[in-house]
Amino acid sequence: MKKYTHPTHSHVTIFEVPKKQLDHIDFAICKQPKETLKSYYKRQEKKPDLLSNGGIFHMADGATYFNFIDEGEVISGWHWYDMGIGIVDGELKYGNVSAEKWTDFVSAYPPLVAEGKALPITFAAEIAGKNKRKVLAYNDKNVFLIEIWTPGMRFSEMQDMLLEMGVTHAINLDGGESVLTLEDGVEVNSPKGTYRRPVDNVVAMFLKDLKRIQVGAWKNKLYAIAMQARIRLLPDPIKAGYKSARLVYVDGWWKVQVGAFYDDDGVQRVVDDLATHGITEIFITTKD
């Protein structure tokens, strides 16, 4: 995952998550009628890596607006504002709430980009001015959470920015004082004085562990250096990154680590290749 400030819009923070790193996304209802992100995070047995405010709701009483589905249960079902983003068979997808069997779904208010094109904005005129925003977007390779802080953006400005970023689908979520993101339970890039508005629903992202191939462990650093040098000289037709083999010191042991993968296939490919070179004392670790 990458977190960065937009190169030409200093008030925009982007969380860019490669799909290969994403374990799953959950659109979830908060403790009713509403609660803060930190309260939601603390209640979860499995903690999300990224936690964001979600779709629009009625601020007075926390009632869910438009269309929202959580784990197959229709929390709110309206006959309009039916386009949004949801989960179908574990995949993030833009579409109509009536067109799929959604696991989760949140309405766009409004939809911004579909199939790589800016959409006509035909509603949401009451929030069309420069406002703080939260956007959920994706393309073939990445999923994006985008925060737009003061002085805000108009929808047309957002669409221009999203298309420049290479986004193919994007929706506007709740904005204003709802805008907030937690990374590992900690507020990220929130301007000083940010109000932590309790919200009705959230977007939670869970990431896969980064797996590294560990070759041996030694108390004597010299032995580890020798193994590192041996691995760096190996031919690398599978692009395992042997030339970048690194030394780490963990719990009193010097270790040599190779590669960084989110999928088991990549790990196994390197393990099998190392075995052909007589290197078989191998462990898989998720610790640096």
Image: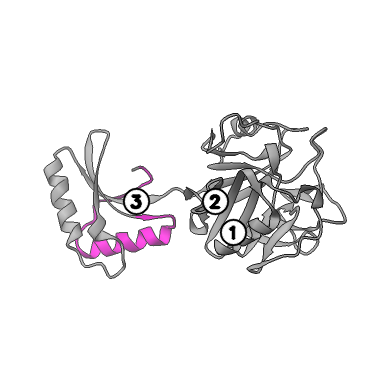
For residue 86, say whether it is visible. no
Question: For the C terminus, which image quadrant?
Answer: top left
Segment tinted magenta in the rendering:
260-287
The residue that mark 3 highlights is 212
The answer to whether the residue labelled 2 contacts the one labelled 1, judged by CB atoms less than 8 Å apart, is yes
- The answer to whether 238 appears left or right of 96 in the picture is left
The answer to whether the residue labelled 2 contacts the one labelled 3, judged by CB atoms less than 8 Å apart, is no
Q: Is 249 within the magenta?
A: no
Q: Amino acid at mark 3?
A: Arg
Q: Is 278 within the magenta?
A: yes
What label does residue 13 carry, if any? none
Horizontal and vertical percent for residue 88? 67, 59
Name the N-terminal-most of marks 2 and 1.
2
Measured Cα–Cα span from mark 2 to mark 3: 36 Å
Name the N-terminal-most of marks 2 and 3.
2
Q: Quadrant of residue 287?
A: top left
Q: Amino acid at mark 1?
A: Met
Residue at 53% over, 49% down = 15
What label does residue 9 carry, if any? 2
For residue 197, say whether it is visible. yes
Measured Cα–Cα span from mark 2 to mark 1: 9 Å
Residue at 75% over, 44% down = 56
Residue at 73% over, 49% down = 129
Which numbered disc, 2 or 3, marks the residue closer to the eye?
A: 2
- The answer to whether 99 appears left or right of 269 in the picture is right
The residue that mark 1 highlights is 161
Q: Is residue 158 above or below residue 46?
A: below
Measured Cα–Cα span from mark 3 to mark 1: 35 Å
Circle 1 SS class? helix
Seen from the viewer's position, the closer of residues 119 and 50 is 119
